[in-house]
Amino acid sequence: MSTVVITDLVPGVAVARSDVNDTITSWVSGTAALALSGRNVRPEGLDRRSFSAALHVAQTEDAGSNSINQSGTASGAVTSVLYDVVNCGGAMETNTMTFSDPTRIVLVHAWVYMEGGATAATRQKVFVILQHSTDGGAAWADITGTEQIFRMRSGLVFAQIPAISRSACWCVWRSPSASTKYRIAFKTENNPGGGDDINFKNAGIFVEVFRN
Amino acid sequence: MANEYRQNWDENGNILDPSMWLEDNNRLAGEVNGGLDRDNFPANTIVSTEMSGGDFVEVQMDSTNTAYSPDRTSTDWQGGSAAGATGLAMEEWVGEEDEHVDVHFNATWSWNGSTSIYEAGSTGNRPTQTDPNEQYYDTVELRLVVDGNVVATLGPFDDGAEYAATYGVASIQLPSGNHKATAECRCARRSIQSGSLRGVCTNTITFTARSLVVLERFR
């Protein structure tokens, strides 16, 4: 044990620095890190409760309509999932589903289900594409690699396949972080309309937000 | 532990000893130097901006709209290189540690000629197999391959749909190190009845928009 002798200790008088032999190295020990990192944390000392929780967006679904309203923010520290689905309720040419979130990585999944009409002769080519906006929805841009096209061949008698039959598609995309809104857009070859007989039955989109 | 309490007091009559003076300091240092835990970080105290990017998830992607037409005269798997004129899609990455990986792939394509579907009794493309009643069509299959292992297969899809699309996903566990994911396709004529191979396609196929996404999930 190291000891320190303090001289001239007088009751009622403060100890001065000169009273203490401070050359003894044993006084200098026990340093604490000033720049904390993960190494300052006990192994497996943290669990998910320490991270701020994800807030699922408020969702308003308007089944049977061509429109849907979606709003809210996601604030999860690690990940959040936003989801939206719409029952189209019939033919339409475009549908928009938007999500707002300035994030580091966004993984967008989108799906569409459609049916050909009763008239097999209508060989409509259908385009489905994911679009994104960096200005809050004022302007939209197609996302490379997500366009999907459907059309049955003409003159098929093998199975009496309707024009489109039942088709579903799905696309997935790593979004640029600047994008704040996403939507699924549809169009037909002869857009707009022109005797098309295609029913978009339902569609969905979900956005995985990875912040870290 | 969230709280450390003072252990020693100096009182009149004590001999001052540095080890006693430093004991409190050492306890605090020990707490900070590797002893912090959830008591020090109560619920919802860590937000995203306090963590470095990629701690939990990384996403890689290979995507294009460039047309790619596989060799219709081959029934081998092909196209497992970077998305472009000569490949469907491919992604390479280095896993810093062991990880769980989701591989997503979507693609759309078109058949460029008339349908190859043979109708029994028709005068269309007559099959070469011995059973005259067998019907066939040109098909394309797709598969996802990670580090040489097939993790998902899609199809076969016939050319009755002039334009069509598909999506597939696989989820696997990988060790740390170099990894490679590819999307590949195989063109072949197949029996409608049995699905068996019946030679090469007569119809050509062109892939257009496609996207291969690799989602790395870390512990």
Image (cartoon, coloured by chain):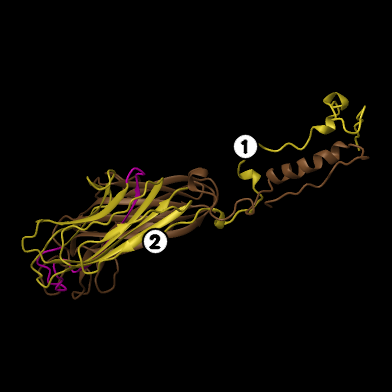
Chain colours: A yellow, B brown
Q: Please state the extent of the stretch shown in magenta in the rendering.
A: A152-179
Estimate how packed mark 2 is, as few (under 14), some (14 to 19) or many (20 or more) residues with alpha carbons within 10 Å. Answer: some
Residue on which disc 1 sits:
A35
Quick check: can you spot residue B147?
A: no
Position of A209 with respect to B124 (left or right) is right
Q: Residue furthest top?
A: A18
Q: Magenta residues: mostly which secondary structure? A: loop
- Residue B152: which numbered mark, if any? 2
Which chain does the numbered disc 2 sit on?
B
In the image, residue A133 lies in the stretch drawn in magenta? no
- Residue B3: which numbered mark, if any? none
Q: Amino acid at mark 2?
A: Ala
Which chain does the numbered disc 1 sit on?
A
In the image, residue A156 lies in the stretch drawn in magenta? yes
Name the image quarter holding residue A198: bottom left
Q: Amino acid at mark 1?
A: Ala
Q: Position of residue B163 (x, y in %)?
A: 19, 59
Position of A174 with respect to B114 (left or right) is right
> Camera-side residue: B142 or A210?
A210
In this rendering, the answer to whether B122 lies above or below A104 is: below
**SS for callout 2:** strand
The N terminus of chain A lies in quadrant: top right
**SS for callout 1:** loop
Q: Position of residue A192 (x, y in %)?
A: 9, 56
